[in-house]
Image: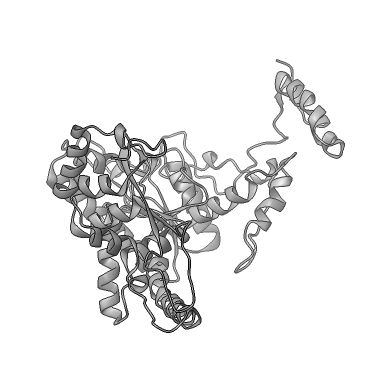
Amino acid sequence: MSEKSKKIQCRMFTEANRQHIFSQFWQNMTWPEKKIYVSNLVDTMAPKDLKIQINQISRRSKTFLCYLKKNGVRLTVCQVMFINTLNLGTWSLRNWVTPSEELDIEHPDNVEVTLHQRNRINTRHESDRIGLRTFLMKLPKMESHYCRVSLSKKYLEPIWQSKAALYRNYVEYCEDKIIKALSLKTFHEEFTLNNLGLYSPKKDQCDLCVSYKAGNVDVQLYNHHISKKNRARGEKSSDKKGEEIILYSDGCFAKNKNVTLSNALLNLAINKSIIITQKYLVSGHTQMECDSMHSTIERRIRNREIYSPAGYIAACKSARLNPRPYQVKYLNHRYFKNFAALKYHTFIRPGYKTGDPTVNDLCAIQCRPDGKLYYKLNFDDDWMALEKRLSRKSQEIGNTVPLYENQLPIKKSKYDHLQQLKEVIPADYHLFYDTLPFEAD
């Protein structure tokens, strides 16, 4: 059991540990998952004593470094213990870990011919990878900004629970395209090179979906939720092909689903004689294309020294080069308008009584140039007019006024702290901090 070697940690595993690993391997994994599991626990390297001579090729072209996991940590074990714990044969280990293109490459002539043959194999293998890269590129992804895990990594949407399941889809893709499907190990390597991940962060998970997985939600409610999610996604894909002005957002009441924003959009529709539609994605499934912009900018400003708000302009512009740099507008207090003063509507709730539809039930609102709001509770419904409910004191005001007359002052304590920071800020930026307005605490 290699107990004499200090590098080998076979003694860390009890018989109970090994029995647990064996049971998990043979009872809870499909056959493709077994292969991926083994390939992830075995590293290959050229042996130190490998000697290649003219007219003689060593059959021992690789050394296998085997590991088993204990409490999530990989520990080095000998090959005998690895094979016996998983009840594998030597051939299975070698076949699963080594791509099929590299197995049993023997040539009776000389080393030069063998190296030429290997180069041909590498060239053919590289051409085969193009189909794999195309497959990975087309997979639906969630930007790392939304996941908040690794800003440099892209995560696949939570459709596949394992790489084995994804690999099965890849094999089906290859069959449809009539191209060669590469080995599991090659698939895993390319997946890693493309900086992809299957991890689904908690921040991204839908509360209802998580509750269903825990057995706390009825299957009918869950299926209805998934049906709404898919319908909203389909609606969004369809709207991309049209020319109407359609806004998509999540259902956050404070930011997107409130009467102030609806009145602001209605005011714009009246002044420009256009129709503006706002649609809401299903809660928990609100990933959008704009998330990629946030992710790109965050990667750009990481580990970058920025000493004033204006420094973010250059960072944002240079965050993307293709197809073109981002356009950036520097805003000041004069830009913001008091849309709360608009009183076209005081409520956007469709119903009155208990049990009637609420704001949360809205899936779309449409602002028309005649000053009327329309709503939908389901995307397949017809538009229904939203009744105006104005108080006696309410007046329709079509002109917006500035929200702020002057730049907002900061507290004196914050001003003093910023002055102290000037010691580590280049002198060229000191004027910005000296001219900040502040008010006494």
Left or right: 23 as drawn, with respect to 297: left
- Picture coordinates of residue 218 (x, y %)? 13, 41
Residue 282 seen anywhere in this rendered image of the structure: yes
Give the camera-side residue of 174 and 322. Answer: 174
In front: 94, or 50? Answer: 50
Q: Is residue 320 left or right of residue 210?
A: right
The location of residue 399, given as percent across then percent down, is: 59, 48
Task: Name the spot of residue 315 as percent of width and height, x first.
Answer: 68, 51
Q: How is the image coloured?
A: one colour
Pick the quarter of the image with the C terminus. top right
Residue depicted at 35% across the width and 62% down the height:
185
Specify the quadrant that holds the N terminus.
Answer: top left
Residue depicted at 51% across the width and 58% down the height: 270
Residue 332 vertical position relative to residue 120 in the rendered view, above or below: above
Examine the rendered structure and indicate whether residue 149 appears above or below residue 234. Answer: above
74 in relation to 55, above or below: above
* Identity of the residue drawn at 75% across and 24% down: 415
Q: Is residue 280 visible?
A: no
Residue 327 occupies quadrant = bottom right
Q: Residue at x 49, y 40 (%)?
A: 395
Residue 20 location (% of width, % of height): 19, 38
Q: Nearer the viewer, residue 195 or 189?
A: 189
